[in-house]
Image (tube, grey):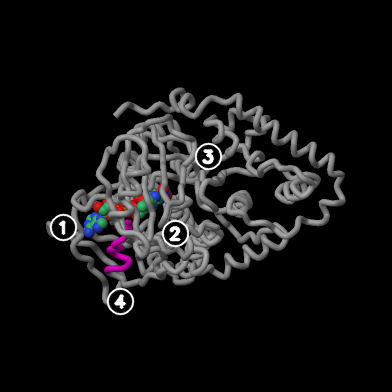
Amino acid sequence: MKKNAQSIQQFVIVGGGTTGWIAAATLANIFKGTAVGITLVESAEIGIIGVGEATIPPFLATLHSLGLDEAEFIKATQGSFKLGIRFEDWHQRGEHYFHPFGSLGRSIDGHDFFQCWLKARAEGDTTPLMAHSPESVLSDHGKFFLPHKALGTALAGTHYALHLDATLVGQYLRAFAEKLGVVRVEGHVESVQQTDVGDITSVQLKDGRQIAGDFFVDCSGFRGLLIEQTLHTGYDDWSAYLPCNRAVTVQTKNVTAPTPYTTSTAKDSGWMWRIPLQHRTGNGYVFCDKFCSDEEATATLLASVEGELMTAPRVIPFVTGIRKQAWNRNCLALGLAQGFLEPLESTAIHLVSKTLALFVRMFPDRSYNPLLRNEFNRRVRADYEEIRDFLVLHYCTTQRSDTPFWRWCQTEMKIPPTLQQKLDFFRAAGGLIPGTEELFQPTSWYAVFNGMGQEPAAYNPTLDALDYSKLAMSMQRGKDAILAAALKQPSHADFLAEYCQAPKI
Ligand SMILES: Cc1cc2nc3c(=O)[nH]c(=O)nc-3n(C[C@H](O)[C@H](O)[C@H](O)COP(=O)(O)OP(=O)(O)OC[C@H]3O[C@@H](n4cnc5c(N)ncnc54)[C@H](O)[C@@H]3O)c2cc1C
């Protein structure tokens, strides 16, 4: 096979938010030492969105694939650790549940652990499901450690992610990418040039400079400067499934040590996040403007946050949905330019990395074979649909009827058929319908089904063939081992101080 004479030689990335710099770092890392050029254009005048501070475990794989040192990265971004999400007041006011990142218990004699737990409950055992989750138990006790330091204990399989300062992440990745040869251009893109058939050839800045390339990566945020304003790709609006369309955000001073989890609290017309970093806390209220004005949402947020305000409240409008094609012609849209799903499960930064990994697997040459592009677009859409369904599950199973918003979620929210099928299947016998390459593994589905009060009609009858006393003992031992190991770990605050204390700012 001959070397491809049509290979892409010059990438132009428009946008220098978290997305633009992840794309630049990833491409620069792949092409280091080659003649392939990467230019990133960003405009300080426009700035970045500056939110997006909670991640999920695959983000660590992104850091590692770039060869970045985790502790250094956490220090530089004022990061903290995240074992999962604590959901408050979602099912009913006053109730809470935890969505952990790792696994739940261990299969017993080949039986799925969740089925064993259902059987135990039917026998009268009242142990909560989350007593079998290392992340949940660690979180309850405010503990953290690195799982590889607990090999041989019940905590060895613990999964974690990070909370990060979005602005500092961009700065860190920028330094990394520039070291690898990425050329950063400060400027405001004013026009885009195309061939007769529509492929993009260059972008022109306000000061007249023109930046030409073979392939363009649109990381320009919600505006979708290339993918939408230039290529008119179209957008599928998913507001009928997920009605929230605004967020108001504010940063506050820390009043307590950072928790090793994100908190999501259901409010009258949406929900509020709390993301603890080393130097401050990020807060935001995601709401729907059909049920709540900006002023009401701001008042709710300000009444709920702890600690002195460090920024003025800022309202961010958004439309939930996905660009009809993430890759159109010689342009790949990433991040907010590609689509938006509310940050309930902190999935946006992950989608940037996952889309990039998929793009690398289907890497085009300048013939831009539509077979690659179509399959790529199909898979990106499947990722969005999976996350969308999982998010809808959090809302449509609520038992809250104390406000018009929550009544709407119970009665009028559209449920995607793919989710309805999963709900029906679970309700029948506690089973799941897994797809291929899915982000959310069984633990995630069980955690939210259970936290939102979903009850299967029956457990798997083959469990009755087991000796129940042995099953109960095995479960008890597993649970005790998690608790005993968790209590021996340092507090999250002590671990941060010892392992990755960030400079005071
Ligand atoms: C309320 C909210 C909460 C969120 N929370 C999370 C979370 O917890 N976890 C998570 O993973 N994600 C979260 N996200 C998503 C996350 O914020 C984004 O995925 C992330 O910040 C990346 O944004 P971006 O880089 O795509 O866009 P932006 O940050 O908007 O960057 C756009 C870039 O394009 C440049 N640009 C635009 N137009 C031009 C032009 N004409 N010329 C030159 N440059 C231009 C801008 O200067 C900027 O550099 C959240 C999003 C919102 C709205």
Left/right placement of residue 204 relative to residue 354 reads: left
Q: Nearer the viewer, residue 145 or 23?
A: 145
Q: Considering only vertical position in the picture, is 463 above or below 435?
A: above
Q: CA distance from mark 3 to mark 4?
A: 49 Å
**Residue drawn at the location 68% of the way across and 30% of the way down:** 152
Magenta stretch, residue numbers: 218-229
Identify the residue under disc 1. Answer: 209
Q: CA distance from mark 2 to mark 4?
A: 52 Å
Q: Mark 1: which amino acid?
A: Arg
Q: Are marks 3 and 4 in contact (CB under 8 Å)?
A: no
Does the stretch in magenta take in 221? yes
Which badge, 1 or 4, is on the more N-terminal residue? 4
Identify the residue under disc 2. Answer: 403
Q: CA distance from mark 3 to mark 1?
A: 47 Å
Which badge, 3 or 1, is on the more N-terminal residue? 3
Where does residue 112 sit, x and y in percent of width and height? Answer: 73, 50
Does the stretch in magenta take in 414? no
Left/right placement of residue 204 relative to residue 241 reads: left
Q: Are marks 2 and 3 in contact (CB under 8 Å)?
A: no
